[in-house]
Image: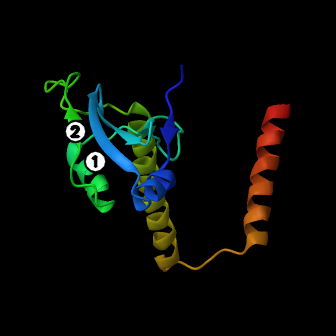
Amino acid sequence: MAQEMIDHGSLTRLNEAGVVSQVSVIAQHGGWTIMIKYGASQAALMAQRSGKVRVFKRFETLAAYLKEFGINRFEVDITDFDPANGGGVTRPDRSEALKRAHEAAALDAWLREQVQESLDDPRPTVAHEDVKAYFAARKAVLNKKESK
C-alpha cells in the first residue's frame, strides 16, 4: 500500500484549521522525515520538487521548519538513527554540477581576461579585409604546395 503524503500547503491549511493532532519525526537512513496525524489520517510530508517523502538531512533544519508553523512539540522516533552515518547523504549529482559550475566560472573569468587584454592592447587594429586577403594568400600558397 502506498504511503499517504501531504505537501507544504496542505500542512499549512491543516495546521491553521487546528486539526493536526500529532507530529512525529522519524529517523531514517540519510535524515529525518515528518509524519502528520490529523483526524483519523496520517501522512508523510512530501517534498515539493520530487513528489517523494521529504527527508531533512539536519534535525535542526527540521525543527526550524516545524517552528515556523508554531509546532513546538513533536515525538521523535530514533529507531533507525545511525550516529555513525552523521545523518548525511552523499549527492554525487550535486557534486558534479558544482564542479561544472566552477569550471564554467573559471572559463568565463579567463575569457573575460583575454577580451580585456585584447581591448587594452596598444597595437593598431587590422582591417577585416586585410586579414582575409592575408589568409587567402597563405591558403593559396599551401594549396599550391599540396598540388605538387
Q: Secondary structure at mark 2?
A: strand
Extreme left residue here? Answer: 83
Q: Position of residue 75 (x, y in %)?
A: 22, 39
> Residue at position x 54%, y 39% from top?
51
Q: Which residue is mark 2?
A: 75
Residue 54 image point, x, y percent: 41, 39
Please tell me which residue is depicted at 44% across the width and 66% down the height of the picture: 113
CB-based contact (under 8 Å), mark 1 and mark 2: no
Whichever of labels 1 and 2 marks the residue nearer the N terminus, that label is 1
Q: Type of residue at label 1?
A: Leu
**Which amino acid type is shown beneath numbered disc 2?**
Glu
Of the pair 142 and 68, the residue shown nearer to us: 68
> In the picture, residue 16 is in which quadrant?
bottom left
Residue 34 is left or right of residue 79, and the answer is right
The total of numbered circles placed on residues is 2
Tell me which residue sits at (40%, 45%) in the image. 98
Mark 1 = which residue?
62
At label 1, counting other C-alpha atoms closer than 10 Å, the crowd grade (few under 14, some 14-19, many 20 or more) is some
